């Protein structure tokens, strides 16, 4: 007698969803990086909500090439006790108008698909989830991000002269 073993269905990534996330993240990053102080792109800004300081976010360019950039996005100070400071390496593809997370926290590289269960307990769709988190975080930064006070005061003084 032969027993049939039901194998779990293999995870297949939704490339449309991932592409839409990466496209949206490119647009969000572009809008964030358009903040300027003294004619220079801002690499650091503060988060404020209802007169409450929420932290500071830094964008560092790690590498540039003809059509790509590698950025380090990190929240260097977070006033909330329940959230770790996000730290992500993001590859920006200017020719394709896409941005994707290539590493997050201590993970060196995010696999497009993970077998499940696995040693690190990553979800099969970990890459899509992390890019979704980046989208949420960038939306939050766009909504509550402000130039640091020293830049705002300097810009106001420059405008008055």
Image (cartoon, helix red, strand yellow):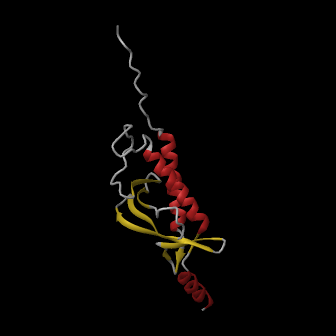
Residue at the extreme top of the image, as rendered = 1
The total of numbered circles placed on residues is 0
Q: Residue at x 57, y 84 (%)?
A: 155
> Which quadrant does the N terminus fall into?
top left
Q: Position of residue 104 (x, y in %)?
A: 40, 56
Q: Position of residue 39 (x, y in %)?
A: 51, 78
> In the picture, residue 99 is in which quadrant?
bottom left
Q: Residue at x 37, y 37 (%)?
A: 115
Q: Position of residue 16 (x, y in %)?
A: 50, 40
Q: Residue at x 47, y 40 (%)?
A: 15
Q: Position of residue 11 (x, y in %)?
A: 43, 34
> Which quadrant does the C terminus fall into?
bottom right
* Side (left or right) of 157 relative to 113: right
Taking 106 as reference, is 158 above or below it?
A: below
* Side (left or right) of 150 relative to 60: right
Residue sitting nearer the eye, 97 or 113: 113
Residue sitting nearer the eye, 119 or 61: 119
Taking 9 as reference, is 75 above or below it?
A: below
Q: Residue at x 65, y 75 (%)?
A: 51
> In the picture, residue 68 is in which quadrant?
bottom left
> In the picture, residue 9 is in which quadrant?
top left
Taking 100 as reference, is 152 above or below it?
A: below
Residue at the extreme bottom of the image, as rendered = 161
């Amino acid at each position: 007698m032969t027993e049939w073993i039901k194998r779990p269905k293999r995870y297949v990534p939704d490339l449309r969803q991932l592409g839409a996330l990466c496209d949206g993240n490119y647009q969000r990053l572009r809008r964030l990086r358009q903040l300027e102080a003294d004619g220079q792109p801002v690499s650091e800004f503060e988060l404020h909500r209802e007169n409450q300081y929420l932290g500071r976010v830094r964008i560092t360019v790690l590498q540039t090439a003809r059509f790509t950039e590698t950025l380090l996005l990190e929240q260097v100070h977070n006033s909330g006790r329940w959230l770790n400071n996000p730290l992500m390496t993001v590859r920006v593809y200017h020719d394709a108008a896409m941005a994707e997370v290539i590493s997050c926290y201590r993970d060196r590289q995010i696999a497009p698909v993970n077998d499940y269960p696995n040693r690190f307990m990553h979800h099969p769709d970990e890459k899509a989830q992390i890019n979704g988190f980046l989208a949420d975080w960038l939306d939050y930064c766009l909504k509550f991000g402000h130039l640091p006070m020293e830049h705002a005061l300097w810009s106001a003084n420059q405008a008055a002269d």
